[in-house]
Image (spheres, rainbow, N blue to C red):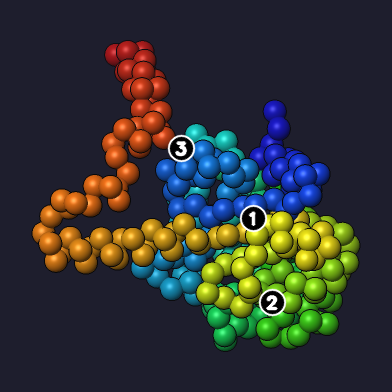
Amino acid sequence: MTSAGAQFRDEIRKARAAGLPLHVIGVADGSDALEAERAGFKAIYLSGSQIAASRGWADIGRVELRHVVENVQRVIDSGVRLPILVDIDTGFDDVAQTIMVLERTGVAAVHLEDQEDLKACGHLPGKHVVSLDAAVARISKAVKAKRDANFIVMARTDALAVEGLEKTLARITAYSNAGADMIFAEAFPDVSSYAAVKKAAGGKPVLANMTEFGKVALKTPKELFDETGGNVDIVLNPLTVYRAQRQTAAEMYRELHAKGTQRGMEPRLQNREDFQKLIDYPAQVAARAELLKKSG
């Protein structure tokens, strides 16, 4: 049976063969994951920022491993067949335990950053990174904790805004040499720099984060592939759908409060039949009935 990590690697290879980076989309829960799968995405993502936001928290390191596992399980419980990349911030209390727990849970990949534990969103000012030695030790410990060689430890660096390009490229080389399987080059506004990133990574896959309202110009996977000379392997949209959901929710709450009724809103709502089709309601009923019959 193909492991989740092997599946993620294979999707990158297939995308590259088609002349594209793998396009990865952020999801919040199991229903989101099923919608992403239905739309045609081949890999999905769980953002630490979204996990924090779902609790009304800032993305400043308050999320713990237990919160991430809870969200991962919600996605896996949906039965989605897509490999999952998970944000593990700075690794939580024990990065080795984090790797072992998430690998057992069934995720394909994690990304581990080099910020201090009081972290900030990668596209906000005020970031601070740990020393190169501390970051390398963090990555080495994560890599050693893997049981499946195909499980992916992706090293994310936030150093560009703090230390500049030359030192950041040195970090990327050190992270690759420490065993990182892939590199997440955060907040690189100049697409021409990805050639240097790829070289510093020793040719390992490189992820570009196309998040809204940040430091990068938004581009399609094809545009990034062409403009970087093929030096980007994964393109991530981490929060687009979640931000759309938050905006819709804000508008709906205000409108419902003002009008006192949802009359007239129906065309803007997912209807019951479409949701039942998404989750395959008849199959769930049949499976539940069979389980109850056996247990009775």
Q: Can residue 247 be seen at all in this image of the molecule?
A: yes
Coordinates of residue 286 in the picture (x, y in percent): 36, 18
Mark found first going from the N terminus, 2 or 3: 3
Q: Amino acid at mark 3?
A: Ser
Is residue 156 toward the left or the right of residue 291 in the image?
right
Q: Can residue 152 be seen at all in this image of the molecule?
A: no
Quadrant position of the N terminus in the picture: top right
The residue at the point 53 percent across, 55 percent down is 26
The residue at the point 63 percent across, 43 percent down is 42
In space, the residues marked 1 and 2 are separated at their CA atoms by 23 Å
The residue at the point 65 percent across, 52 percent down is 23
* Residues at discs 1 and 3 in contact (Cβ within 8 Å): no
Coordinates of residue 252 in the picture (x, y in percent): 25, 60
* Residues at discs 1 and 2 in contact (Cβ within 8 Å): no
Which secondary structure, mark 2? Answer: loop
Q: Which mark is residue 189?
A: 2
Q: Which mark is residue 110?
A: 1
* Residues at discs 2 and 3 in contact (Cβ within 8 Å): no
In space, the residues marked 1 and 3 are separated at their CA atoms by 20 Å
